Amino acid sequence: MAAPWRSLRLVAPIGNRSTRGIHQLGGAVDPESSQKKRRTMLQYLSDHFYDVEFLRGYFLQNKMDKVHQKNRSFAHLEETHGPNNAGAFFILKQGGAVKFRDKEWIRPDKYGHFSQEFWNFSEVPVEAVDASDCAINYEGLENLHLLKELQSLSLQRCPHMDDWCLSRLYPLADSLQELSLAGCPRISERGLACLHHLQNLRRLDISNLPSVSNPGLTQILVEEMLPNCKVVGVNLAEGLKLGPEEQPQDTDRPIPA
């Protein structure tokens, strides 16, 4: 019984205090404990802040490395499988789809797997590519230069497609007839001006380009630049923006003195 008795003696002085003393003791302990927790948290954030920034930079760099890896050149396949197969393989690995002339579309499934039948089409030209939502960038477009008879190209909603990328489409000028840039967030008027090389274009989709400040005027300029091309995706009535001096005046209100 020695241990329990010593435990009771240890608590006895606190129990003999008044209720006010107990409350005062409780009030003194809680704020101090709370402040200690706050100091501990602040110290933790201070100690690990640079580590968090490092991890953020690491994950961002890792993401960009994956993009560059996916956009590596597949030109080495041209020697053994031909340029059309090499270009098609790049698009399929990106998650896009290809159509060889007089053949059905070849698309990867949800796991990224696709039919290997296209390796038998080395002598058949690729006439259409759907690279919508793919991570193609400036370097990756080099693989499309292998497709000498490409007629239709969709780059809809490609997040890395920018003005510099459009300047790299000129090798397709002889064959390309349809081009869709709809939903590409980084394409502006400057990039669209690079399309003047593509004089064989017959249809161009420039809908939903958030970096284009004046869609209506841009469509007019592109149509003048490519007179044989039908430019779609812009409502001229809503797209044109008037300058301050061209805004309609409200004649019903009195002119301030």
Image (cartoon, rainbow, N blue to C red):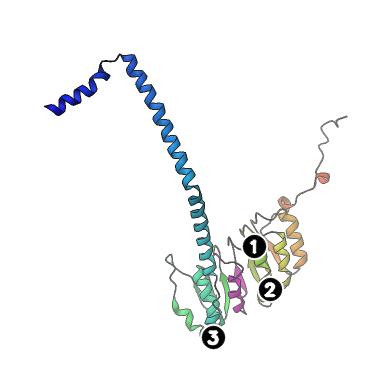
What residue is disc 1 on?
162
Q: Which residue is mark 2?
A: 170
Where residue 72 sits: x, y (%)?
54, 72
Q: For the magenta stretch, what is the residue range? A: 134-159
The first of marks 2 and 3 along the sequence is: 3
Where, by quadrant of the figure, is residue 193 drawn? bottom right
The residue tagged with tag 1: helix, strand or loop?
loop
Q: What crowding class fits label 2: few (fewer than 14 Cα within 10 Å), some (14-19), or many (20 or more)?
A: some
Sequence-first disc among 1 and 2: 1
| Residue under the point 75% across and 64% down | 223
Splitting the image into 4 quarters, where does residue 163 fall? bottom right
The residue that label 3 is drawn on is 79
Give left or right: position of 255 versus 222: right
Residue 65, which numbered label? none
- Kindly identify the amino acid type of the residue bearing the numbered disc 1: Asp
Q: Residues within 10 Å of mark 3 (few under 14, many from 20)?
A: few
In the displayed structure, does residue 157 sit left or right of residue 107? right
Q: CA distance from mark 1 to mark 3?
A: 31 Å
Magenta stretch: residue 187 in it?
Answer: no
Could you say which is closer to the camera, residue 61 or residue 184? 61
Q: Position of residue 228 (x, y in %)?
A: 74, 70
Compared with 244, 219 (above or below) is: below
- Amino acid of disc 3: Glu
Sequence-first disc among 1 and 3: 3
